[in-house]
Amino acid sequence: MALQRGIVELVPYDSNWVKEYEKEKELLERVLKDFILEIHHVGSTSIKGLWAKPIIDILIVVKSLDEIPKIAEILKDYDYENRGPQGIEDRIFFAKGPADARTHYIHFTEPKSNTYYDLVYFKRYLNDHSEYLKKYQDLKQKLAKEYTNERPKYTLGKKEFITNVINLAKEEYDD
């Protein structure tokens, strides 16, 4: 389980991804216990049956992103690199592992942020709607073949679909 930065390689769903998440969650809860409000397995590795890049995505909700410098200092000892917001204003992104073998991503955000709802609702909607899971699977495989060495183009190719699913999820799940 690992992937070189910038490369797109999808592999079939692996039930060990849940175990890898649980193992990392235990570590993160232990070392960041004073900061974590919520922690979630998100992204494609969290969706049963979905092919994915073999990198575990973790969402951590903290009281304030102002806590990130303290968190970054702690996570340095665990091979995490602070990559900043990466163009998303309500999130700070961390990557674990060297550039040629990324294993985990952490998305730090605050409660009730767009990032929180986008990641949690997207996962929930795909788990609840198998027809959208299939459409997403097909799109990902098509884009992965087309953009194997161009991850930004792969990501951009998924954007419209993801946005549409998030909007459907908000309609369905918001009170």
Image (cartoon, rainbow, N blue to C red):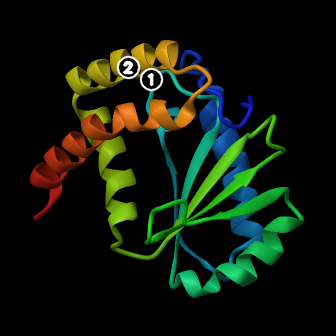
Where residue 67 appears, x then y in whole percent? 63, 85
Quarter occupied by residue 66: bottom right
Residue plotted at (24% across, 26% down): 132
Quarter occupied by residue 89: bottom left
Residue plotted at (64% across, 29% down): 54
**Between marks 2 and 1 in the image, the one whose residue lies nearer the viewer:** 2
Picture quarter with the N terminus: top right
Marks 2 and 1 in Cβ contact (< 8 Å) = yes
Separation of marks 2 and 1 at Cα, in angstroms? 6 Å
The mark found on residue 137 in the picture is 2
The mark found on residue 50 in the picture is 1
What's the residue type where badge 2 is placed?
Answer: Gln
The mark found on residue 149 in the picture is none
Picture quarter with the C terminus: bottom left
Is residue 38 rendered to the left or right of residue 95?
A: left
Compared to 87, does 58 lie above or below? above
* Sequence-wise first label, 2 or 1: 1
Where residue 126 appears, x then y in whole percent? 30, 34
Crowding at dot 1, Cα within 10 Å, few <14 / some 14-19 / many 20+, comes out as many
Compared to 47, does 87 lie above or below? below
Residue plotted at (33% across, 40% down): 159
Is residue 166 rendered to the left or right of residue 30?
A: left
